[in-house]
Image (tube, helix red, strand yellow):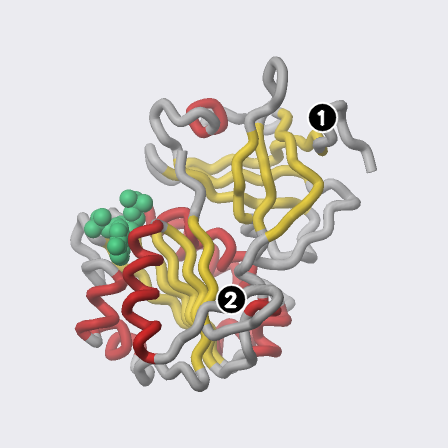
Amino acid sequence: MTLNSHGLFAERVTDVQHYTDRLFRFRITRPQSLRFRSGEFVMLGLPQEGKPLLRAYSIASPSWDESLEFFSIKVPGGPLTEQLQNIKPGDEILLRPKTTGTLVHDALLPGKRLFMISTGTGIAPFVSIMRDPETYEKFETLVLTHTCRTKDELKYGFDSVAATKDDPLVGEDANKRLLHFASTTREDSAHQGRITNLITSGEFFRALDIPSLDPAEDRIMLCGSMAMIKDIKAMVEPLGFVEGSHTVPGSIVVERAFVG
Ligand code: A2P
């Protein structure tokens, strides 16, 4: 294990793709000794004078991947993303050696359907989870939802679902058992509106032709805006969904997406 003087891994950018003026994806080399569970996040940053500024980034690659993928927002004036959005292949990225997170299988009770509900860059941990064979062993059906302001912002999700369905490891299962529902809130598209409203109106369940939520068999993971997480929790807790953690598994787990 080679850590720099701040106790961080120094890795290299291998690939960058900009989707919009607000969103981009990048890949870096993986430290050989970095172990993580699909769905976890890592503290990541750029080298600078003095103590590096690090932020929590969900790892979008599955735990077996040789490189690490991240999906990031670009915030004008954001202390990290203002710099990070300019990275190019070959640039250095710093990583803390420890990963953590609640969007992991251990925090959920066994169930039949796994609902992964995301907004914006909150889709990243689910891209990791839907490429992990363990997810298909534990659940019969995976339902990924992604809501963004515009259609361009949904492209990363569509690309990732297509790559998952093409993946030699999980592709066959994903083609049969992974459902994807994408909606936009500030532009017309196949499904328009916040996921909260589309669940309440029933449009979400009708579009996928699936039964509505049942706490006995369904498990929910939430990642994205704080407001979305709060509203979905307020909606499903009265149905009997209970928040889980590593120590006490439950029927719903949440993680805020990093902003700024
Ligand atoms: P909206 O456009 O109506 O605010 P952002 O890009 O600001 O992070 O937001 C990502 C997506 O999350 C947007 O489509 C946004 O919808 C949606 N969103 C924001 N707040 C909520 C909420 N309370 N419940 C559901 N979706 C939300």
Amino acid at circle 2 = Lys
Describe the element under mark 2 as helix, strand or loop: helix
Q: Which residue is outermost to the right?
A: 1
Query: Helix, strand, or loop for circle 1?
Result: loop
Residue 6: image tag: 1
Residue 82: mark in rendering: none
**Local crowd at mark 1 within 10 Å, few (<14), some, or many (≥20)?**
few
Which mark is in front, 1 or 2? Answer: 1
Task: Answer left or right for 24 relative to 174.
Answer: left
Q: Is residue 78 above or below residue 252?
A: above
Q: Nearer the viewer, residue 150 or 220?
A: 220
Q: Is residue 30 above or below residue 216?
A: above
Quarter occupied by residue 202: bottom left
Q: Residue at x 38, y 63 (%)?
A: 117
Asked if 203 appears above or below 96 in the picture, the reply is below
Percent across and percent down for residue 181 are 33, 66
Identify the residue shown where x is 47% and y is 27%. 80
Q: Residues within 10 Å of mark 2 (few under 14, many from 20)?
A: many
Q: What residue is rendered at 58% in x and 35% in y?
A: 44
Is residue 166 visible in this depiction of the protein?
no
Mark 1–mark 2 distance (CA, rounded to whole Å)? 40 Å
| Amino acid at the residue labelled 1 | His
Q: Earlier in the sequence, mark 1 or mark 2?
A: 1
The percent coordinates of residue 156 (x first, y second) are 42, 50
User: Looking at the rendering, which quadrant does residue 62 occupy?
Assistant: bottom right
Residue annotated with mark 2: 165
